[in-house]
Image (cartoon, rainbow, N blue to C red):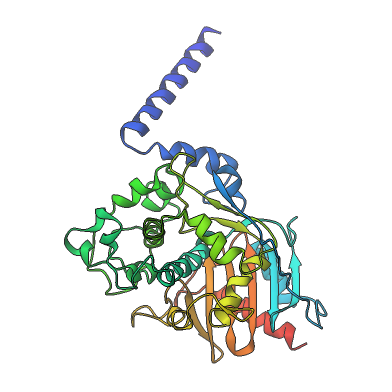
Amino acid sequence: MKYLKKILKFVLVLLAITVAVLYITDTDYLIKAVRTIYMKGHTTAYLEDYKEFDNQTIAASASPQPWPNHANYNSTTETKTLSELNSLTGTVAYVIIKNDSIWFENYYDGFNKNSKSNSFSMAKSYVSGLMQKAIQDGYIKSLEQPVCNFLPAFCDGEAAKMTVGDLSSMSSGTNWDEAYYSPLSITTRAYFDDDLAKVMNGLKMETEPGQSFKYASGDTQMLAMVIEKASGKKLYNYFEDSFWKPLGAENETLWQVDSEDHDLVKAYCCIASNAKDFARYGKLFKNHGQWNGKQILDSAFVAKSIKPRFNDGPMYGYGWWLAEFNEKEIFYMRGHLGQLVIVIPKDDLIIVRLGHQITKVVGDAHSPDFYTFIDESYEMLEK
């Protein structure tokens, strides 16, 4: 018994020292990471982790607009290849929308059409749209307005050259490190820290802004802080009023915040909703910023968003991923683990896939699964 007491005492002392070191070294966010992710058997953020964090609720539309079913709704089954890929990668929702009507939908692993799941970086597309909305509303002058006008931490040296448009097009020039699996990266810190603004204001400049594409979640987080400062509105409220309700969302959604005290949305990620409500934003951009005849976003901005800004970054515009496949121009929302809203304007087609994992991006910056989802959807449509 005495031996066991000594061991227990040693463990408690060691634990206390570890916690003290984490606080002294300003890495105490790792305690939250261990509690919410690692102790639950995961090595990275996962689809339902939003339940472990503070969230703000975004209300559904008071006049919801259900998607109509296509005349050929669910008239065919998944191809063998698609079925195997969905099973292998843990797809939880797969929806094909043709001519603004639900042509096919299926749900898996206990999820249904109303189930919430984390969208991760798909949120970046929404934030870029909110930037344009803030310009239309007169809160921000233009894409060329300096970030320094809103965030004093970025007024010195090269940082003073950074513009709002640089943040939307991923060209801030900061030293943000997009490392999801390293517990000590700024990406991990941002996900778990309870004072996200402090984390962001500590970024340093690495290169001259506005010169080239470098994917950095921190750019979107800074953009959200700019929008809040410019508008005087909480981003989740602005999002609700600008997009979620006007686009007729059928379900309420959740947007993670860093903490109840600081109440800053994790804008680079973390809107939890369902496939068909996510698809509405793809439809808005497919229709040049119009929704039911109303111009919600400027069509010129929409066109600019889905074209690359930099020659060395043809895969990204302003908040949207870009691709070309089988002579079709494609733009899409993309999130960690393979959350996808794929828009193919030429064929009036939207494909939504949500799931637990995806084959790693290689080569041209798009996952091979991305192409398979498209190929197999066309195979189904042609049956």
Q: Residue furthest front?
A: 138
Residue visible at 18% across and 58% down in the picture: 156
Q: Is residue 358 visible?
A: no
Question: Where residue 323 appears, x then y in whole percent?
Answer: 49, 81
Q: How many marks?
A: 0
- Judging depth in this view, the residue of 136 and 289 nearest the camera is 136
Q: Is residue 370 left or right of residue 361?
A: right
Q: Is residue 46 visible?
A: yes
- Judging depth in this view, the residue of 7 and 376 nearest the camera is 376
- Judging depth in this view, the residue of 311 and 376 nearest the camera is 311
Question: Where residue 366 appears, x then y in whole percent?
Answer: 50, 74
Q: Residue furthest bottom?
A: 327
Residue visible at 26% across and 69% down in the picture: 209
Question: Where residue 142 appears, x then y in whole percent?
Answer: 34, 73
Quarter of the view holding residue 371: bottom right
Classify 193 as above or below 290.
above
Q: Residue furthest top?
A: 2
Question: Where residue 202 appears, x then y in whole percent?
Answer: 28, 49
Residue visible at 70% across and 72% down in the picture: 95
Quarter of the view holding residue 112: bottom right
Viewport quadrant of the N terminus: top right
Residue visible at 58% across and 82% down in the picture: 287
Classify 259 as above or below 274.
above
Viewport quadrant of the C terminus: bottom right
Classify 334 as above or below 15.
below
Classify 98 as above or below 67.
below
- Judging depth in this view, the residue of 98 and 315 nearest the camera is 98
Q: Is residue 222 left or right of residue 345?
A: left
